[in-house]
Amino acid sequence: MKGNNPRAMAPPAPARDEDISSLLRELVAHLRQNRTDLREEWARRITEAELLTAMSREEVFAEATSVYDNYVEALETGTFEALQAYARNLSERIIPRGVETHEVVGIVLLLRDVLARSLFSKYHEDFDKLNRILDAYEPAANRIAITVAVGFVQERERIIREQQEAIRELSTPVLQVRERLLILPIIGLIDPQRARQLTEQLLRGIRTNRAKVVVIDITGVPVMDSNVANHLVQTVEASRLLGATVIVTGLSPEIAQTLVNIGVDLSKMNTVGDLQGGIEEAERLLGYKVEPLVEASQAGAGT
Amino acid sequence: MEVPILKQGDFLIATIQSALTDSDLLHLRTALVQQVVRLRSKGVIVDVTALDVMDSFATRTVRDLAHMIKLRGAATVIVGIQPEVALSMVQLGLTLEGVATALDLEEGLAYLSRKFRWG
């Protein structure tokens, strides 16, 4: 209905700007005056819509108060830096508690609705004035909603990036367990970049430790796609070029099924069920024979 | 540049010392295949430690060399492939199928000695 109002469109820009700022001032005064009621109404609507269920009623009210104040301030000053900073700070606090994007967007839109309703009821007698007030209010309110939502999403992305970094930095150790025997326990998801890093580390490890046998344990790898599987095959082949035999252990039933289903050529891969079996097989290849000491086994039987 | 072929007991050792042209490689292959029977060698070691890159031609030549020497009744082992070279080789799909490999010259000698001690 606002767009169809010819009067709102008609005035020249400077006059209109002035008009808008004075309208916004009036609006802000109204919002300040009814702060308590509107805030309560908003908190009630939030609970009603079952948003922010991860937070207690008091917390919701406390956050609602500061969001409200920041909201009014952004309307008043027309600057969004303070609100942006606040949105980031808020996101930082609520993301770890499992607050979802739809909840954050939902509560900001609810506030927008609550305030719009209060404007309707205040100016319902002067339809023309209401239109002009809404003309001033709506773009500002929309910008606020966008600012908060973007702030939240950016904060989330920042957290995701940080976590990715952390995962990448979790070094995958190449460990020597016997003379000429290395183990490489892989834990967590493997992406192409990590796979490449793993391979390089392993090949370097083979050279520096003069390894003959390598056990790659993938018990801790939840899923594997064809890219990673092919990379694993490449690692096995590259290790062989350096004169080392690779034994892969700990393939989960799911991974075994995926690998067969996607048809990765595993004929060159030497696999053993678990890490213990892999190390035993490696010891056999290296000519080691591990036997319990007689005394130790007797002592074990005695206790 | 010619690759020197040294006789060490029952084995021949060819150490590549710098990047080779394709014709150098073919020459090395011919020389080894000829000498392995002439010198009554049981095994051949090709040391590629000095190579920073092994392209498809080099890899194929080395593989063919190993197969030819096998037909001449001896064993071949390729030693000293650098980690980076190994990685780029497998990424190009060059895996030296059916050719024995070892970490370095010492390992290669150990491999051949073992092979001939146990048959």
Image (cartoon, coloured by chain):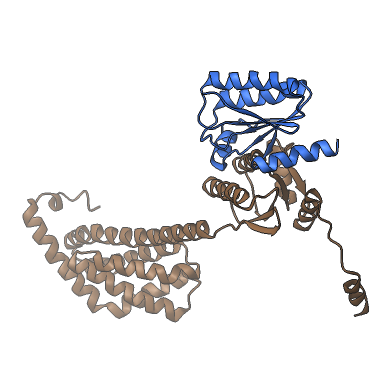
Chain colours: A brown, B blue
Q: Nearer the viewer, residue A165 or A41?
A: A165
Q: State the image coordinates of residue B17 (x, y, percent, origin top left).
A: 54, 32
Q: Nearer the viewer, residue A161 or A53?
A: A161
Give the residue drawn at x 68%, y 54%. Answer: A182
Q: Quadrant of the C terminus of chain B?
A: top right
Q: Report the number of discs.
A: 0
Q: State the image coordinates of residue A255 (x, y, percent, origin top left).
A: 70, 47
Q: Seen in the image, is B77 located left or right of residue A154?
A: right
Give the residue drawn at x 51%, y 47%. Answer: A193
Q: In this picture, is A271 found above or below A60?
A: above
Give the residue drawn at x 22%, y 66%. Answer: A75
Q: Seen in the image, is A66 located left or right of residue A25?
A: right
Q: Quadrant of residue B98?
A: top right
Q: Quadrant of residue B103?
A: top right
Q: State the image coordinates of residue A82 (x, y, percent, origin top left).
A: 25, 69
Q: Is residue A114 visible?
A: no
Q: Seen in the image, is B75 located left or right of residue A79?
A: right
Q: Nearer the viewer, residue B66 or B32?
A: B32
Q: In this picture, is A161 found above or below A55?
A: above
Q: Is residue A301 visible?
A: yes
Give the residue drawn at x 43%, y 61%. Answer: A156
Q: State the image coordinates of residue A225 (x, y, percent, origin top left).
A: 62, 43
Q: In this picture, is B118 found above or below A111?
A: above
Q: Seen in the image, is A123 located left or right of residue A212?
A: left
